[in-house]
Image (tube, helix red, strand yellow):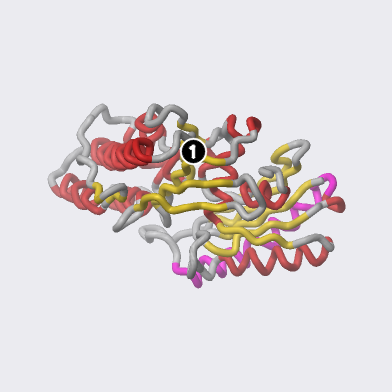
């Protein structure tokens, strides 16, 4: 029996279905439209775009085999599992999920967007089939740069914040540098392709305070390089290498003082091949979501959590 998942982040509207027998059996995702030259959307704009997108996407569920046997509807209702964590854009998904659950007469289960990210990334690694549910997780995106201790071994899953960016998030820097280079928002994929054209090894030395990182210097240095006429590919590579080595140093420090656990890297930033190459040997066990789209915003993790497949 499938479980449904809905996620309405500040970047994409997504819908998924997952069954413990067959895995991911349905997945739809629609990026929110962003005006040329803009760095994202205001919350009111994101909420409006989700409300517009959801009816058509939900209509596609009519093609889903076994919909009448759906066991639960899961939805992301907040960014993180932390007190005061809130963004209006998640109201669109919450309302749609409540209506869908009522129509199907099944339970409505609420999760955080971050928990969905971590569940999707875990599912994409060997740890899922091995039944290993305790791990270190990096969630690195436009709204989060955090390292956590995650435990998904019971229904009341737990995450403990270990380290974070003290200023801007990695995804914010990537989008800002990309915009400066004339790339469209979100800039991650295009910036990574551009960076592959460069063979430069230049980057900024990681700036850490304890286990936490400071990333704003990367953005400032990239702006300086742009002013001096440095090649666009070199600037793109400088940006990604600098972020990658900052995350690497955080990983090393957590490894040295904590339990011996696998690391799972999630979030849209983790789609970068350059950053993945830096982190692949960061720990004895380091895993990334494969296929890479499971790293980005999606409803798959929410559907997995709603299905109880992690228990």
Q: Is residue 82 visible?
A: yes
Residue for point 82% across, 46% down:
1
Task: Tell me if residue 293 comes above or below residue 201 in the rendering.
Answer: below
Image quarter of residue 278: top left
In the rendered image, the residue lying farthest to the bottom is: 44
Q: Dot 1: what SS?
A: strand
- Percent position of residue 183, x then y: 35, 48
Question: How many numbered marks have been drawn onto this rendered protein structure?
Answer: 1
Horizontal placement of 33 versus 129: left or right?
A: left
Mark 1 crowdedness (10 Å alpha carbons): few <14, some 14-19, many ≥20: many
Task: Tell me if residue 280 comes above or below residue 153 in the rendering.
Answer: above
Between 111 and 177, which is closer to the camera in this rendering? 111
Residue for point 48% across, 70% down:
84
Q: Is residue 185 visible?
A: no
Span highlighted in magenta in the image: 42-66
- Percent position of residue 284, x then y: 43, 27
- Percent position of residue 167, x then y: 29, 58
Residue for point 41% across, 37% down:
272
Check if residue 79 falls in the magenta segment.
Answer: no
**Image quadrant containing the C terminus:** top right
Residue for point 26% across, 52% down:
214
Between 35 and 122, which is closer to the camera in this rendering? 122
Horizontal placement of 295 versus 97: left or right?
A: left
Horizontal placement of 19 versus 200: left or right?
A: right
The residue under label 1 is: 264
Task: Tell me if residue 179 comes above or below residue 54 in the rendering.
Answer: above
Report the magenta stretch's main SS: helix
Check if residue 63 falls in the magenta segment.
Answer: yes
Image quarter of residue 25: top right
In the rendered image, the residue lying farthest to the right is: 68
């Amino acid at each position: 029996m499938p479980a449904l998942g809905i996620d309405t982040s500040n970047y994409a509207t997504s819908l998924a279905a997952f069954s413990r027998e067959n895995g991911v059996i349905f997945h739809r995702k629609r990026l929110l439209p962003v005006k040329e030259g803009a760095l994202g959307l205001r919350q009111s704009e994101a909420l409006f775009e989700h409300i517009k997108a959801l009816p058509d996407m939900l209509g596609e569920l009519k093609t889903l085999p076994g919909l009448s046997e759906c066991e639960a509807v899961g939805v992301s209702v907040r960014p993180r599992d932390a007190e005061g964590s809130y963004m209006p854009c998640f109201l669109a998904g919450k309302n749609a999920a409540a209506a869908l659950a009522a129509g199907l007469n099944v339970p409505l289960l609420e999760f955080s967007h971050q928990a969905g990210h971590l569940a999707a990334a875990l599912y994409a690694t060997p740890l899922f089939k091995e039944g290993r549910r305790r791990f270190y997780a990096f969630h690195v995106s436009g709204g989060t740069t955090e390292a956590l201790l995650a435990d998904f071994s019971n229904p009341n899953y737990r995450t403990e914040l270990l380290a974070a960016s003290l200023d801007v998030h990695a995804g914010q820097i990537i989008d800002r540098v990309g915009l400066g280079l004339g790339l469209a928002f979100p800039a991650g994929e295009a910036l990574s392709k551009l960076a592959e054209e460069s063979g430069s090894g230049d980057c900024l030395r990681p700036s850490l305070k304890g286990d936490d990182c400071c990333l704003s210097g990367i953005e400032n240095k990239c702006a300086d390089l742009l002013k001096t006429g440095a090649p666009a590919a070199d600037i793109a590579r400088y940006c990604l290498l600098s972020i990658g080595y900052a995350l690497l140093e955080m990983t090393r420090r957590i490894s040295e003082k904590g339990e011996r656990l696998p690391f799972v890297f999630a979030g849209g930033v983790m789609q970068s091949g350059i950053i993945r190459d830096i982190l692949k040997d960061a720990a004895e066990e380091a895993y990334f979501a494969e296929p890479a789209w499971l790293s980005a915003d999606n409803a798959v993790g929410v559907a997995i959590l709603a299905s109880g497949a992690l228990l």
